[in-house]
Amino acid sequence: MKRDPILSPGTGTFDAARLLADRGVLAGRLDARALPRVADLLAGERGAPVEWRIGSTVESGGRPALSIEVDALLPLECQRCLGEYRWPLHHRSVVLVAFGDAQMAQLDHDSELEVVLATGPLDPVELVEDELVLAIPFAPRHPQCPPG
């Protein structure tokens, strides 16, 4: 019997239950400027390459989770000198997976980790965009700019 692929052709979405069961990994590249909630946070006009990886994992309490890794070189505006600089981002997070509203409420109550509801297909680009929004500093500053 042929199994369906983890990543749905044409939609770019994936089945979290299948990814977890297969201990699968998805990976890709994108330009952060294509992400609406991130584009406004970027400086200049240059590209903002992002490499991402989403894989099956188990968090410390033994619960199924997704590991989301994001590596990027993002053009940000220094809030001190207003110059542009390329901010290197190497970010990894673990997100618990819930397969129903009750389970989501319980996991959200029991853990400080983020929880994603996987009752339908998940969009890996949306998960990456969420991670970028959370990781980009509110007031970025060149490392060499003196504190205010």
Image: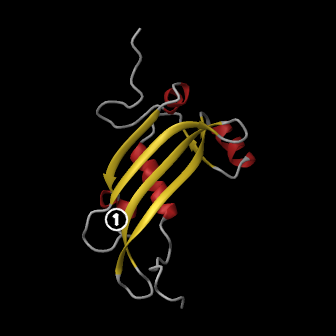
- 97 or 66: nearer the eye? 66
Quadrant of image for the C terminus: bottom right
Across and down, in percent, residue 49 comes to 32, 57
The answer to which quarter of the image holds residue 32 is: bottom left
Which residue is found at the position 65% from the left and 50% from the top?
113
Across and down, in percent, residue 1 comes to 41, 8
The answer to which quarter of the image holds residue 34 is: bottom left
Asked if residue 103 is positioned above or below residue 74 in the image, the reply reads above
Amino acid at the residue labelled 1:
Ala
The answer to which quarter of the image holds residue 58 is: top right
Asked if residue 52 is positioned above or below residue 48 in the image, the reply reads above
24 to the left or right of 125: right
115 to the left or right of 22: right
Residue farthest left in this picture: 45
- Kind of element beneath mark 1: helix
Which residue is found at the position 47% from the left and 42% from the top?
54
Residue farthest front in this picture: 144
Which residue is found at the position 34% from the left and 37% from the top?
12
Across and down, in percent, residue 48 comes to 32, 62
- 118 or 54: nearer the eye? 54
Residue farthest top in this picture: 1
Please name the residue that numbered disc 1 is placed on. Answer: 39
